[in-house]
Image (cartoon, rainbow, N blue to C red):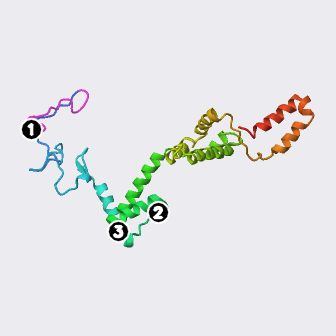
Amino acid sequence: MSDTATVEPGETGLLDNVQVTDDTKPADNSQKVEIDHKATPAGAAEPDEPLERPDFWPENFWKKDSNEPDLEGIAKSWGDLRKMISQGKHKAPEGGKYDTATLGDGPVAGALTEFAAKWGLPQAAFDELAQRTMAIAEESAGPAIDTKAEIKALGPNGQAVINGMVDWARGLVNKGVWGKDDFEEFKIMGGTAKGMRALLKIREAYEGRVPIESAPIEGAPSKEELYQMVNDPKYKTDAGYRQKVERMFQQFVQ
């Protein structure tokens, strides 16, 4: 006779009365230890512990915010260094013949070249010095002025106004009223239409109305022709004609 118990079928299926016995219970996994494949090896620093820059690693290639080496920065620096050496810019040029393409021709280029030659600066150091000098010069100079627009803003005889004021300023220097420094300040103040008008008002305050003549504007009658128009009988009888001639005269007098 078999020890196996007979399975009695239930009302709705063959396995209705089947129960789980003790020897078929699943193993208890409550004490199972999961092995972490990312576990920190013995003696290694914890992940949250910040790295420290080794003494041999350059401080300027260390990211202080993330406490890690700047590999991209040091690689780029090494590439630039190799390029500089290959071009010979790591040493001073023979005979002090520096490449001044960054500066162009002028007193600044001459002064920097003389300085670099005196101290034996490498071409690379000269290039950096030239770039910084030009940047400071551009910043000090301020925005560029559209001289054509400024002349136009002075009116149809704008260039004549400028020429007359320059002659006036030179006359003050020749008379000893102004010095050379005063004339340089005059050039700065008169560099715009507003500044030139202000100077003209100062001049007129002492000299009265300043007549400024210039060549006739293209398409406009000459001064002789204007006088002929004044002698025309219509100038006395036709108000519109007279106003037209007067407006034309104003083109010759600011």
Decide: is 179 above or below 243: below
Callout 3 crowding tier (Cα within 10 Å): few <14, some 14–19, many ≥20: many
- Residue drawn at x 41%, y 67% is 98
Work out whether residue 125 or residue 68 is closer to the camera in this orientation and state it. 125
User: Of all residues shown, which one is farthest toward the bottom?
Assistant: 94
Q: Secondary structure at mark 3?
A: loop
The Cα–Cα distance between marks 2 and 1, rounded to whole angstroms, is: 78 Å
The Cα–Cα distance between marks 1 and 3, rounded to whole angstroms, is: 75 Å
Residue type pointed to by label 2: Ala
Circle 2 is placed at which residue position? Answer: 101
How far across and how far down the image is residue 44, in percent? Answer: 12, 50
As drawn, is 101 to the left or to the right of 30?
A: right
- Quarter occupied by residue 21: top left
As drawn, is 157 to the left or to the right of 140?
A: right
Q: Which circle marks residue 92 in the picture?
A: 3
Please provide the residue range marked out in magenta.
11-29
Q: Which circle marks residue 31 in the picture?
A: 1
How far across and how far down the image is residue 176, in percent? Answer: 54, 45
How far across and how far down the image is residue 79, in percent? Answer: 33, 63
